Image (cartoon, rainbow, N blue to C red):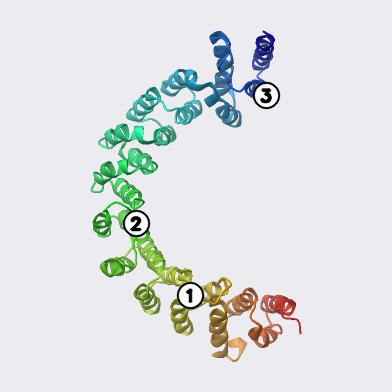
Amino acid sequence: MESTCMVLQQVEVAKAAALGGDWAGVLAVLRQWLQSVEEPVQGQSSEMQEAILALALQVLDAGDFATRWQVGKLLPAFGPMAIAPLIAILEDEEADLEERWFAGRLLGEFRSPEAIAALVRVLQKKPAPDLAAIAAHALANQGTVAIAPLTRLLSDPATSSLAVHALAQIPDAGVVPPLLGVVTHDDPAVRSAAILALSNFRDEPLMPVLVAAAQDRATAVRRAAAIGLGRRATPVSESELRPVFALLLKDLQMPVCEQAAIALGRLKTPSAIHLLAAELQSPLTPPPLQIAVIRALAWTEIPLALTLLAQALPHLPIAACLETIQVLGRVPKGPLQPQAAGILLAFWATHPAPAMLEPALLRALAHAWELLGDPGAVSALEQLRHHAQPQVALHASSALTRLSAQFPS
C-alpha cells in the first residue's frame, strides 16, 4: 500500500512537470520509479502502468532529440506493453519524423512478431531515408526471425538495398541463401553489399562467388570482391587466387587497386609480397597505389617485405619515399626494428650531403630514427641538428635527446 502511494505521488509530480514542459523533471521521476522496483511493470495495477507509460510517451512526443534519446533508454523497461503505442507512432504519417525514427529504433529492441510486421509495413511504404534506414536496422536487431521478412523485401527494388544491408547485420548462416540470390541484382549497391556480407561466412563455399564478383562491371562490386577475397584468402588458396589479385591490382579504379593491395598484404606469402613489390617499382603505378602498396608491405611485418622496400626506396618519387621512411619508423619493437633502422641508414649513406634530400625526407628520417631508438643514427642526426631549416634541426635535436636518454654515455 505504501509503495502504491509512493508511485501515485511520483506520477503526480511527473504530471505536474509535464504540464510545465519540464521534460527533464519527468525523466527524473521515471528514472526514480524504475530504480525503486526490480520489475517496474510487475506488481502495479494496469492503470498505474499505463499512466507511467503515458508519461514516458509524452516525453517521446514533446521532447527534443537529447530528451527523446534519454527516454528511449527507459522505454524498453516497460516490456511488451510499450509495443502497441510505439507501433502507432511509427505508422502515424502525420507524426513528427524524428519521433517516428525513435519509435522504429525502439521497436528493434522488442522480440515481437507485431514489431516485425510494423517495421516491414513501414519499409513497404517507402518512407523518408532516415526512417527507412532505422526500420531496416531495427529489423536486423530482431535476429534470425527477421530473415524471412527481409528476404521478401529483397524482391522490391525500392526496399532491396535496405533489406540486403539489414541481412548483412545478422550474423547467422541463414542469411547466405537470400544474399546469394542478389549477387547478380541489377543494382550494384545491392550486389556489393551482398558480396561484402557473404565474405564474412568463412565456412561457406563462397569463393567462386567472390572470384566472379572480381570481374563485375561496377567498381563498388569489384572493390567488395577485393575486400572479401582478402578476408577469405589463405596461403593454401593463394595459387588459385594470385591471378585474380593481379588483375584487381591493375584495375582502372583506384579503390579496387587499394583493396587488392591490402588483401595481398594480409596473405603475407612470399609470392604475394613479390607481387606487391613489383607493382611498387613499376613506372606505371600511380602515386596513390604506391602509397597503398608501401603500407601493405609494411603491415606484413615480414623481413622479405622490408628487404624489397629497401630495394625500391632509392628509386621512388618523393611522396612514396616519404611514406616508406614513415612506415619503417613505425615498425614495432622486435627483430624487424634493427632491419628497418639499417635500411634508413643505408638510404642516408647514398646521400652524403643533406642538401641532396628534400627537407620533408630529412624530417621523416630524424623522426623515424627517434621512434626506432637507433644509436647508429647519432652521427647522421648530429649533421641534421645543424641544418639550415629549423624544422629539420628541431626533429634531429628531439631524436638526439631521446637517444641520449636511452643510451647514456
Residue 400 against residue 195 in the figure, above or below: below
- For marks 2 and 3, the one nearer the N-term is 3
Element marked by disc 2? helix
The amino acid on which the numbered mark 2 sits, given as a three-letter code, is Gly
What is the C-alpha distance between the residues marked 1 and 3? 58 Å
Q: Looking at the picture, how far across and down is residue 48, in whole percent? A: 58, 11
Numbered label attached to residue 320: 1
Residue 193 visible in this rendered orientation of the protein = yes
Numbered label attached to residue 249: none
Side of 295 where 373 appears, left or right: right
Which of discs 1 and 3 lies nearer the camera? The answer is 3
Crowdedness near tag 3: few (<14), some (14–19) or many (≥20) residues, C-alpha within 10 Å = some
The amino acid on which the numbered mark 3 sits, given as a three-letter code, is Ala
Which corner quadrant holds the N terminus?
top right
Q: How many marks?
A: 3
**For residue 215, which quarter of the picture?**
bottom left
